[in-house]
Image: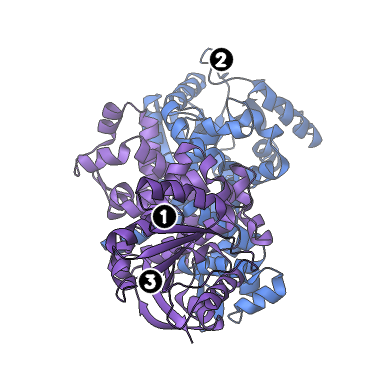
Chain colours: A blue, B purple
Amino acid sequence: MKISAIDAKFEAQKIAFAPITFQAIMAMKNLGVMEYIYNKRGKATTQGLVNDLGLSKYSIEVMLETAEVMDIITLEEDKISLSKIGFFLLRDELTRVNMNFVNDVCYEGSKYLEESLETNKPAGLKVFGEWDTVYEGLSKLEKPVRKSWLEFDHFYSQDAFDSALKIVFADKPKKLFDIGGNTGKWSIKCCGYDPDVNIKILDLPGQIEMAKQNIADHQLQDRIEFHPINLLDTAQKVPQGADVIWMSQFLDCFSEEEILAILLNCAQAASDNTTVFIMEPFIDNQPYDAATYSLVATSLYFTCIANGNSKMYKMSTFKELVDKAGMKVDETFELIGDSYHTILKCSLK
Amino acid sequence: MKISAIDAKFEAQKIAFAPITFQAIMAMKNLGVMEYIYNKRGKATTQGLVNDLGLSKYSIEVMLETAEVMDIITLEEDKISLSKIGFFLLRDELTRVNMNFVNDVCYEGSKYLEESLETNKPAGLKVFGEWDTVYEGLSKLEKPVRKSWLEFDHFYSQDAFDSALKIVFADKPKKLFDIGGNTGKWSIKCCGYDPDVNIKILDLPGQIEMAKQNIADHQLQDRIEFHPINLLDTAQKVPQGADVIWMSQFLDCFSEEEILAILLNCAQAASDNTTVFIMEPFIDNQPYDAATYSLVATSLYFTCIANGNSKMYKMSTFKELVDKAGMKVDETFELIGDSYHTILKCSLK
């Protein structure tokens, strides 16, 4: 990016005041200021905002002056309009989900990011409780925090599963291992998609308990079985017998060393007929900057809040790890179904 | 600003993640990453950073990937350089002062900005203590917080006083009232500049006590006297007898209504021979965007932390208030001495 010194100084100030201007946008959204301006379609005025929203002229002025220097509104005479950036802040779902996640889950803990980078522990997690990782504390988070966390988690995985089913079931696997199966959402989808497939969910014992209930609710206990396993303990082996081993947004919860250990564990369980599918949002093949930015910034959440040592990875890094684990990537399905996700289809070398 | 939808979405994500990316920059500065990259003059590498700074490869990668999407570093092959924005974040004094101020004074309290905008009380101040305004609590703030506050306060007033002296003393005033005289810094400068002038500092009783000590240290007690006054109490009148009434970065601590009341108080004390000088950094006549942005964003600090109802004002607003108070602006000295400050020279109509 070519930029003059005077513009660089301007950009630096945007960063310098970013936390407080972020809160100004949150307030403008929550207090209805942005919605009001949008609905007035170019005819909003300061006085109108004061009259209709019941806020002081002072408060309206402080918000509008901030929004103007941030290029979120434009002024023509005394008429106020939302800019394109303002429109995305108000209406875009990616932006909404990211902002709520950052405000509710990351804001306070981010103060400890420096400590996390030094220790590779999620130092910011202490603002919620004394846990080693956010996953341990998830069920104990306060409702609005948990809601923002879940919406964020869900947003980045939606749209990918339906496209993934076609890829995974192209060769009609009979036995699928869903590693890091979590609530069982993917396994349930698989059973609906292919009436003949049988599934084994591999996850931590605590997760398995939650998944079991979910599977029973769907009356799929005859087709889905469970295998409690802690993959950070390399003595615990993935069992053999899978036609497909599936890992979706699972490996990004681990460090590179841990990912390699898990891939080696998969490789020891695989036969020549086993296909290992890895689905991840990678930071080096996103189609537009907003997506790349969101994923890269999400790494900071992993550092500071989630676990202290995982991140969003590059596809090139994953391909190297697959190779080191004694496997090869047979096919790459990039950005399936307009999602952020890429599937690496792997097998033993 | 013309911008495509896809770029607007990108800008919106920068805002959405701003608090956590802000902390990433703070960490990169504090951990020496930016200094290292700068000193290597285009030859820094990831491995070099890992080796020389004693941080994990993981932590270095998370920081560098963030810095890259923020346009703070540039990569050529595996060589890392600071961008112009990165240089300003590392070396520019305005940026340094703003960042430390935002991080130490504003970060946590900003969470309450929405509440402040609804109530016009400094709701964020509670993170430091139970005070009505930051001024009450200033002496009790923890040292690093107070240091960042004072550096910020000082940065925006430096460079203006020397140029201001020439303007104020052009007509050789014998008696100068320094309203909101604070520590007495301006009054002491006046005594040094003109051996014949006598000063009266008008301020809150608590401030007067602190100023008295300072004046005594400079052995100026014969030339500087004190007048305790609470200007929010309109029953307390500014005394008569001033050739010059001086108010520097004082009125921006008040709401428009309060400013008008103070100006009316000055007007009742003024004779036809009294000149009222108002020195302020105004948001509508700054020479470059970085300055405007800094001042406008500072209003959010006033809303949320300082007092809940003051801000950085437009010059046009001040000129209207001067007019309403029965005075006229005889001369405007804009951006004196390369500072952010403008002096309005006023007198009775």
Q: Residues within 10 Å of mark 3 (few under 14, many from 20)?
A: many
Q: Chain of mark 2?
A: A
Query: Which callout, 3 or 1, points at the residue further toward the start of the chain?
Result: 1
- Cβ atoms at labels 2 and 3 below 8 Å apart: no
Task: Name the mark nearer the viewer: 2 or 1.
Answer: 1
Q: Residue at 40% x, 47% y: name it.
A: B216
Residue at mark 2 shares a chain with residue at mark 3: no
Q: Residue furthest front?
A: B222
Between residue B43 and residue A291, name the one nearer to us: B43
Q: Amino acid at mark 3?
A: Thr
Marks 2/1: CA distance? 72 Å
- Mark 1: which secondary structure? loop
Quarter of the rendering occupied by the C terminus of chain A: top left
Residue identifier under label 3: B342
Q: Residues within 10 Å of mark 2 (few under 14, many from 20)?
A: few
Between residue B25 and residue B288, name the one nearer to us: B288
Residue at mark 3 shares a chain with residue at mark 1: yes
Q: Position of residue B325 (x, y in %)?
A: 55, 80
Q: Amino acid at mark 1?
A: Gly
Q: Position of residue A139 (x, y in %)?
A: 70, 33
Q: Residues within 10 Å of mark 1 (few under 14, many from 20)?
A: many
Q: Which mark is residue A263?
A: none
Residue A54 vertical position relative to residue A292 in the rendered view, above or below? below
Residue A113 vertical position relative to residue A80 in the rendered view, above or below? above
Q: Position of residue B116 (x, y in %)?
A: 64, 57
Residue identifier under label 2: A236
- Residue A54 lies left or right of residue A175; in this view the side is right
Q: Residue at 28% x, 48% y: name it.
A: B91
Residue identifier under label 1: B184
